[in-house]
Image (cartoon, grey):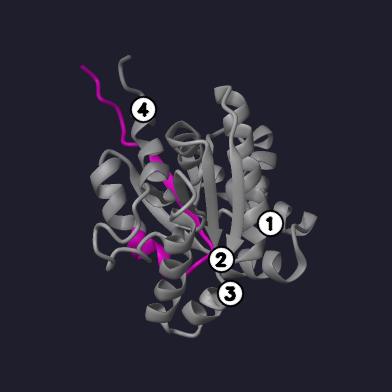
Amino acid sequence: MNTGTAPRVCVLHTVASLPATFDPLLRELAPHVRPYHVVDESLLADTVEHGPLPRTAARLAAYVHQAETAGADAVLVTCSSVGPFVEQTRPLAGIPVLRIDEPMAVEAVRTGSRIAVLATLESTLAPTADLVRRAAADEGRSVTLTTTACPGAYEARTGGDQDRHDALIAAEARRLAADHDVLVLAQASMADALAALPADAVVVPVLTSPRSGTAQLSALPHKGADL
């Protein structure tokens, strides 16, 4: 049987620390792909400062075009704040352009009806909440949604105080767990924030995007493979 050539994947980040987070996940969950990372923190910085600008959407589309020109078979965008731009870019691309948080949204609405979305950036809350609502509609489920930012957490992380970043998220997660069925950590950079807590500290499922988002790549076929 012809197994073909391993698919090449561009993993586009807006946080400089995330390639190190995704490398082990790529090896575990999509070992057959050939990933390469692109980091542009200004995509997120512009969205935080100015909101969803058309020029930022155009720049993301340009990255996708460059990846396709370079021979990539798919692009995985790991930033939830620019998620709507990913969907705008799809009709313009000849390769799959994946949002990191789409599988997480589907899992959330299948897990419970009272959903809390936590973020450290206000710019992430609306795109993630919209994604969850659309997932609920697609699944035919009725949900109630709470969105909350964790004041000071983003500034702590960008200032190098990861412990304070994690502590602020953990405190908010504990508060929300009391009257919600599932918690959604909206940003990939939040994924490890609760790792140091005891297993019973947060008593409802906590969903993060890196693992389920990366697992999407496992479905990519080898190029030229016999079907």
Which residue in the structure is indicated by mark 1? 59
**Camera-nearest label, 4 or 3:** 3
Task: Estimate the spatial distance between the alpha carbons at disc 1 and disc 2, rounded to whole Å.
Answer: 10 Å
Q: Say if mark 4 contacts mark 2, CB within 8 Å.
A: no
Residue type highlighted by circle 2 = Asp
227 to the left or right of 141: left
Which residue in the structure is indicated by mark 4? 221
Name the residue at 36% across, 27% down: 221
Q: With respect to residue 45, does 148 lie above or below?
A: above
Q: With respect to residue 160, does 209 lie above or below?
A: above
Q: With respect to residue 106, does 83 lie above or below?
A: below
The answer to whether residue 151 is magenta is no
Task: Estimate the spatial distance between the alpha carbons at disc 1 and disc 4, rounded to whole Å.
Answer: 28 Å
What is the x, y in percent for residue 187? 50, 58
Please tell me in which quadrant of the rendered image residue 24 appears.
Answer: bottom left
What is the x, y in percent for residue 26? 31, 48
Give me the disc on residue 40: 2
Pointer 4 or 3: first along the chain: 3
Task: Estimate the spatial distance between the alpha carbons at disc 3 and disc 2, rounded to whole Å.
Answer: 24 Å
Tell me the magenta residue range. Answer: 1-21
